[in-house]
Amino acid sequence: MESPSGVMLENGYHKVTEGTLRWIEKKRRWYIRYTVSHYFDRAARKSGKEPVFYSNYNMKVNLTDEAPNPITQAYTHLKTTEGFEDAKDI
């Protein structure tokens, strides 16, 4: 993955760091807007380095009792977006 500034994150570590639920009356649905922090790699994240960049995503969220929690749903959604199709859980 390439950052907006051109830094290649070949072993990038991507973490959902924030999520905000919103009811969209017009669509009569709950949505989550979530932020992903993109780190150079896992070691950078573990050592407290700042993310290389952040990105935001919006998606419909299922808030029924049977559904996974919203953050899990955000990770599942992220894996369907361009550049994350081969992402692995670690």
Image: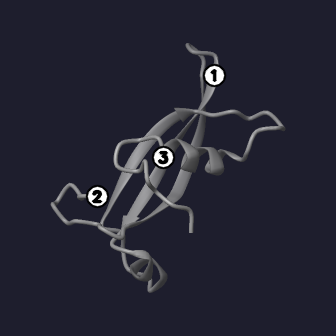
* Disc on the earlier residue, 2 or 1: 2
Crowding at label 1, few (<14), some or many (≥20) Cα neighbours within 10 Å? Answer: few
Q: Disc number at residue 29?
A: 1
SS under mark 3: helix
Amino acid at pointer 3: Leu
The percent coordinates of residue 30 (x first, y second) are 63, 28
Q: Residue furthest bottom?
A: 47
Please identify the quarter of the rendering in which residue 23 is found: top right
Q: Disc number at residue 63?
A: none
* Disc on the earlier residue, 3 or 1: 1
Q: Say which residue appears at 64% left-offset and 50% top-offset.
A: 72
Q: Is residue 45 above or below residue 65?
A: below
SS under mark 2: loop
The percent coordinates of residue 10 (x first, y second) are 30, 67
The quadrant of the image that shows the N terminus is bottom left
Residue situated in front as seen by the camera: 86 or 56 = 86
User: In the image, 87: left or right of 28?
Assistant: left
The quadrant of the image that shows the C terminus is bottom right
The percent coordinates of residue 31 (x first, y second) are 58, 32
The percent coordinates of residue 24 (x first, y second) are 57, 22
Distance of mark 3 from mark 1, alpha carbons? 20 Å
SS under mark 1: strand
> Answer yes or no: do the residues labelled 3 and 1 have beta carbons within 8 Å?
no
Q: Disc number at residue 1?
A: 2
